[in-house]
Amino acid sequence: MITPALPAPYDQADVTLLGQGLTNSAYRLQLQGKRYFWRQGIAQPETLFIDRQQERQALSIAEAAGLHPQIHYHSADGQQLVLAWCDEPSWSPACFSSSAGISLLGQLVSRVHAFPARLKVLDLSDYLQRFINSLPSLPADLCRHVCRLQMMLKALPARPLVLCHNDINPANLLGTKPWLIDWEYAAMGDAAFELAVICRAGQFNDSQRHQLVAAYQSAGGDCDAARVMQMLPVVDMVSLLWCEKMLLLRPDARYETLRQELYLSVLGSQVSDSPA
């Protein structure tokens, strides 16, 4: 099979679709007795504020640290990514939210945050505003809630910026090591936001959230549980606005279901219509 998106020899590989992720497509390549993983990025990633060149820098850091499978090919535009095949499965939600899993997550995140890096900064207030500006129609009460979150973010005491993955969830963790994949949202940022993302990904309760922060602190990380708590509604809002954006770009029942769940979480009510 000829795969024009990839150079030789990968263009001659047998290709098997593994799945359509929320943004990207994943394939297995079979070539001369070897298997590889191929990530094909979503068209126009900049519409989701994904910076492929920033992702390239983060991948280089993660690969050098032994946290990411070997990169065999990465296209100039960053869209095509061929990795060494990993036979280990992604984490299950149960593993992610288990006591042992939470302890590993705290250690992993502390390690990532300690990596020296000079990536662009994810300013969360600005990030929310970019979503708002790019969406044609949103409920007024949602926009008011965004404004309140932006005021809260701007009032927070400044903290040292650290390298954040910003999308740590069960699907992005492989095996017992674990490998940490999908660095497309990586940036310098607030450790509390990263930890809050994990809490929402695992639907952690108060006890689990405190365990995550304690494990992070024990491994050398510097963040307190109160700041993580403040970031939880920011994570919810970012996720909701991301769903609104995806429904415009590529309507999918999965986005609509997640959108309704997030509206309930953020505003306490659902919305009846998808954005026009």
Image (cartoon, rainbow, N blue to C red):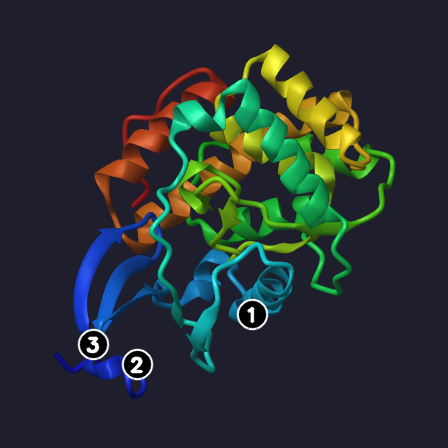
Query: How many numbered tags mark residues here?
Result: 3
Q: Is residue 161 left or right of residue 178?
A: right
Between label 3 and label 2, give the one nearer the viewer: 3
Residue shown at 43% from the left, 75% from the top: 72
Q: Of helix, strand and loop, which one carries label 1?
A: helix
Q: Is residue 248 left or right of residue 169?
A: left
Instruction: Specify the quadrant that holds the C terminus.
Output: top left
Give me the disc on residue 187. none
Pointer 2: what residue? 6
Q: Amino acid under label 2?
A: Leu
Please, is residue 68 above or below residue 32 in the view?
Answer: above
Q: Is residue 163 left or right of residue 9?
A: right
Give me the disc on residue 13. 3
Whether the residues at callouts 1 and 3 have beta carbons within 8 Å, the answer is: no
Between label 1 and label 3, give the one nearer the viewer: 3
Q: Of helix, strand and loop, which one carries label 3?
A: loop
Question: Toward the viewer: 42 or 99?
Answer: 99
Whether the residues at callouts 3 and 2 have beta carbons within 8 Å, the answer is: yes
Q: Position of residue 207 (x, y in %)?
A: 62, 11
Give me the disc on residue 56. 1
Mark 1 or mark 3: name the one nearer the start of the chain: 3
Q: Position of residue 123 (x, y in %)?
A: 70, 50
